[in-house]
Image (cartoon, rainbow, N blue to C red):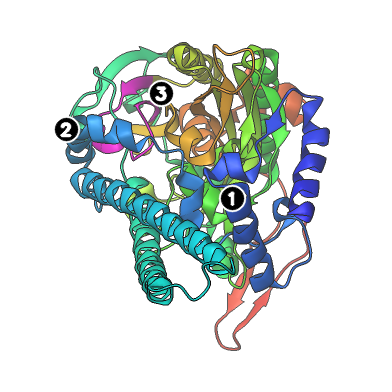
């Protein structure tokens, strides 16, 4: 326990200057200090690591302890509302009624254990008093004392066995309870449409007029894949050879445009009060799970690193939420706004049709993420402000878009409300998602234990923050929309004005006068021959 305390006190010293207070493991997990110490000591012994729990590379093997702050009483009181949310979202494997039954069983077992412990303590005290009397010479050897001792010893042994069995059972029930409870999704905003994606409500349109037909362009437009080939902007075949399907090499102006988009959007967000952050591209599965992602098991879209307890991030939202995991924030600091750039990795299946080809659905892509921690009464306003910033970004890029209020089946587990922004993509002949924004209320913060003192100067009473996230820029899809909407009759592409300063003054993407030859696969010998870059 000494080493445990030292590790967390060091963390406290490093973060208290920013007003953020790390919660000790006992407060974090809802456990006693001794039980928490045993828990982490067991993990350290299993890994053979000699380091503090906070610095440990290994994830606790029982991540359900991270979910102790789920409000099970509230879940029970709102079981019907949660059951409706589960049905509306079509969340598989979530069963609020089973969760409530497990909670009731846990409470009953815990009460019985307390009674058994009290009875055991009474037997122990009675035995001590009896032995004390027997040690008195005047009473030693008195009739019935030996039999009473034997009776109490037998009774104590029976109680210990019953208590051991009950504690084992309650531990199993508790683990099952939290496995079930963490599957329960958030409730839905009353205004959220019900049903599948086609039930999404159009909130508004924005940007320039939609270019839907050749007459709108003044020529016959081509899709972004053709533009990438003609202008030497991306190589999909090389990406497939090196990393597999749905990977790409950006080249020339496309590579510069990715960096330009990232810098421009990061700068716009920073000007709005978002703190720029560069996050790790990996997180521990327990952090991903706390955000509502499923990093393990069948059907997961998460890449796991073999031989490690780490997984690649599907979005930097995971790392940004984990940044304040197990921390209490000063209320005056809320809302906390962050903007981050990261690579994102998603093992999404499908996407082989013409509508999803090229840059639309990649396994690896760059993204700028907007993320905020708010007080409960602030989260709706912060969500609206993020959507306004997203609209401003796509308007300044000269893209026609629409904002959708997404229906229940598109919310996933964490979102209370979610907006999607779709840009018009002429090559697809339809809108395509380029951004989204969600208010997750306290769904993530309860699982990650991110809180703040409320209405209590002592700081002992805490409430959980709300988390709000939004896509600042999903780079490949934004480049796709720019190429298809800003192509011209002479085969060039106009660069949106805000990006020109970040692309060293390049305002037009033109065909290359002396392009580098593409790698040629020699099928007869199975070798690749690369020509020098020109």
Q: Which residues are magenta?
A: 402-424
Q: CA distance from mark 1 to mark 2?
A: 51 Å
For the residues labelled 3 and 1, say whether their Cβ atoms are less than 8 Å apart.
no
The nearer-to-camera label among 3 and 1 is 1
Quick one: 520 or 255, which is closer to the camera?
Answer: 255
Image quarter where the C terminus lies is: bottom right
Which mark is first along the chain, 3 or 2? Answer: 2
* x and y, in percent, of residue 326 in the image: 61, 38
* x and y, in percent, of residue 59 in the image: 60, 59
- Up the image or down, 314 lies above or below 417; here it is below
Check residue 80 in the rendering and tell me which mark sits there, or answer none: 2
Left or right of 514, for residue 311: left
Residue 488 visible within the image: no
Q: Which residue is mark 3?
A: 217
Q: Which element type, helix, strand or loop, lies under badge 2?
A: helix
Q: CA distance from mark 3 to mark 1?
A: 24 Å
Question: What residue appears at the point 71 percent right and 50 percent down from the top-left corner?
Answer: 54
Quick one: 21 or 391, which is closer to the camera?
Answer: 21
Q: Residues within 10 Å of mark 3 (few under 14, many from 20)?
A: some
């Amino acid at each position: 326990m000494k080493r445990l305390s030292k590790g967390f006190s060091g963390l406290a010293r490093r973060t208290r200057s920013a007003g953020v207070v790390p919660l000790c493991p006992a407060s974090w997990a809802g456990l006693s200090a001794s039980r928490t110490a045993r828990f982490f000591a067991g993990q350290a012994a299993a890994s053979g690591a000699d380091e503090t729990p906070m610095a440990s590379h290994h994830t606790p093997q029982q991540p359900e302890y991270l979910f102790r702050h789920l409000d099970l009483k509230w879940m029970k009181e709102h079981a019907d509302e949660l059951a409706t949310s589960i049905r509306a979202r079509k969340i598989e494997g979530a069963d609020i009624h089973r969760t409530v039954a497990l909670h009731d069983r846990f409470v009953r077992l815990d009460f019985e254990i307390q009674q058994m412990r009290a009875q055991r303590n009474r037997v122990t005290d009675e035995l001590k008093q009896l032995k004390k009397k027997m040690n008195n010479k005047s009473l030693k050897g008195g009739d019935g004392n030996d039999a009473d001792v034997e009776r109490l010893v037998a009774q104590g042994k029976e109680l210990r066995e019953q208590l051991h069995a009950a504690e084992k059972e309650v531990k199993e029930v508790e683990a099952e309870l939290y496995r079930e409870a963490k599957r329960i999704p958030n409730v839905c905003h009353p205004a959220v449409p019900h049903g599948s994606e086609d039930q999404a409500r159009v909130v508004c349109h924005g940007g320039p007029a939609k270019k839907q037909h050749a007459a709108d362009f003044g020529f016959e437009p081509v899709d972004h894949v053709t533009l990438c080939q003609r202008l030497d902007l991306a190589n999909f075949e090389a990406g497939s050879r090196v990393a597999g399907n749905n990977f790409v090499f950006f080249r020339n102006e496309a590579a510069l445009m990715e960096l330009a988009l990232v810098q421009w959007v990061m700068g716009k967000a920073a000007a709005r009060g978002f703190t720029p952050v560069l996050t790790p591209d990996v997180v521990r599965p327990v952090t991903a799970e706390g955000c509502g992602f499923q990093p393990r098991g069948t059907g997961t879209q998460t890449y796991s690193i073999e031989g490690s307890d780490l997984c690649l991030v599907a979005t930097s939202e995971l790392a940004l939420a984990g940044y304040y995991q197990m921390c209490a924030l000063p209320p005056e600091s809320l809302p906390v706004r962050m903007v981050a750039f990261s690579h994102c990795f998603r093992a999404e299946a499908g996407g082989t049709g013409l509508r999803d080809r090229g840059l639309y659905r990649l396994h690896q892509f760059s993204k700028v993420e907007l993320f905020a921690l708010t007080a409960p009464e602030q989260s709706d306003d912060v969500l609206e402000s993020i959507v306004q910033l997203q609209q401003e970004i796509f308007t300044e890029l000269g893209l026609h878009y629409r904002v959708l209020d997404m229906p229940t089946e598109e919310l996933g587990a964490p979102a209370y409300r979610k907006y999607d922004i779709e840009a018009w993509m002429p090559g697809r002949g339809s809108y395509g998602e380029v951004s989204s924004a969600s208010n997750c209320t306290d769904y993530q913060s309860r699982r990650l234990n991110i809180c703040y003192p409320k209405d209590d100067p002592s700081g002992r009473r805490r409430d959980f923050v709300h988390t709000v996230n939004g896509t600042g820029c999903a780079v490949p899809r934004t480049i796709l929309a720019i190429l298809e909407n800003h192509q011209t009759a002479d085969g060039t592409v106009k660069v949106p004005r805000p990006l020109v300063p970040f692309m060293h003054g390049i305002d037009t993407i033109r065909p290359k006068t002396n392009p580098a030859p593409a790698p040629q696969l020699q099928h007869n010998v199975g070798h690749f021959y690369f020509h020098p870059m020109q």
